[in-house]
Amino acid sequence: MLKIMEERYKILVVDDEEDICEILKYNLESEGFSVDTVLSPQEALNRQLTRYDLFILDVMMKEMSGYRLADEIRNKRKIEIPIIFLTAKNSENEKLTGFSVGADDYITKPFSIREIIARVRAVIKRTGNPRQNAVEEPVKLSGIVLEPDKKRVFIDGVKKELTPIEYKILYLLVKNNTRVFTREEILNVIWKQTNVTDRTVDVHITRLRKKIGNYGKYLISRSGYGYCFELE
């Protein structure tokens, strides 16, 4: 019964040590969890984070600490999904900092796999499945409204029929308006495949511009960088 329940849970591990990511992925998946791993906070932020039920974050990473990443997830993006911190530091102040930014648990390195599995189970049992119960609020920008739960798009009050890929691209760019995404980032977020080319992104963007009418001109190509949605 427990095994069946755990298969529904998706975990994102963020750690700049590839060996740790591989160890956690192998052992947690052996226990029935679905696990994705990334090697940087920025790569994590490019993911659709609401797809996950638990985050395991390393504290000491180069470009951004796990604390800052947790603050971005919890306080800026308002994603209430459990967080377990991994760290080599064991001081009381470190733990207090972790809990102050929303940690549900705090594990020091080196750790045993049995401990990790036990802590993950305990946090999930305590918090339930927030992803299943969460209702994403509509994303609104000028006359564009996207309804994540129903996968519907309205342009100036008129419903538009988009393909699933077109919807995902528009959602990514509108929700993060003014931020430039490279083609590679869009491929990683939307397709999650290695056999899709950059040209595929360009084709879908062209089709999307036509479907959203007057707002198509705000779906901007930054030469040498990528795409963004930016109102004048």
Image: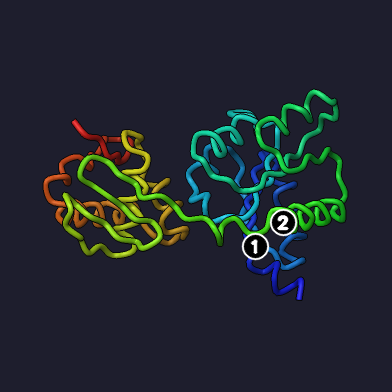
In this rendering, the answer to whether 168 lies above or below 141 is below
Instruction: Give the quarter of the figure containing the C terminus.
Output: top left
Decide: few, some or many residues near mark 2? Use Cα within 10 Å; few <14, some 14-19, many ≥20.
some
- Spatial CA distance of label 1 from label 2 is 9 Å
Q: Which mark is residue 144?
A: none
Q: What element does badge 1 sit on? A: loop
Where is residue 173 drawn, in percent x and y? Answer: 33, 44
Q: Amino acid at mark 1?
A: Tyr
The answer to whether the residues at label 1 and label 2 have Cβ atoms under 8 Å apart is yes
Q: Which mark is residue 9?
A: 1
Where is mark 2, residue-wise?
A: 124
Mark 1 against mark 2, which lies toward the viewer?
Answer: 2
Residue at (61% x, 36% y) in the render: 70
Q: What element does badge 2 sit on? A: helix
Extreme-left residue of the structure: 214
Residue at (58% x, 28% y) in the render: 63
Q: Amino acid at mark 2?
A: Ile
Query: In the image, is 46 to the left or to the right of 119?
Result: left
Q: Earlier in the sequence, mark 1 or mark 2?
A: 1
Colour basis: rainbow
Where is residue 170 drawn, in percent x and y? Answer: 30, 50
Where is residue 107 drawn, in percent x and y? Answer: 81, 41
In this rendering, the answer to whether 178 lies above or below 23 is above
Residue at (37% x, 47% y) in the render: 172
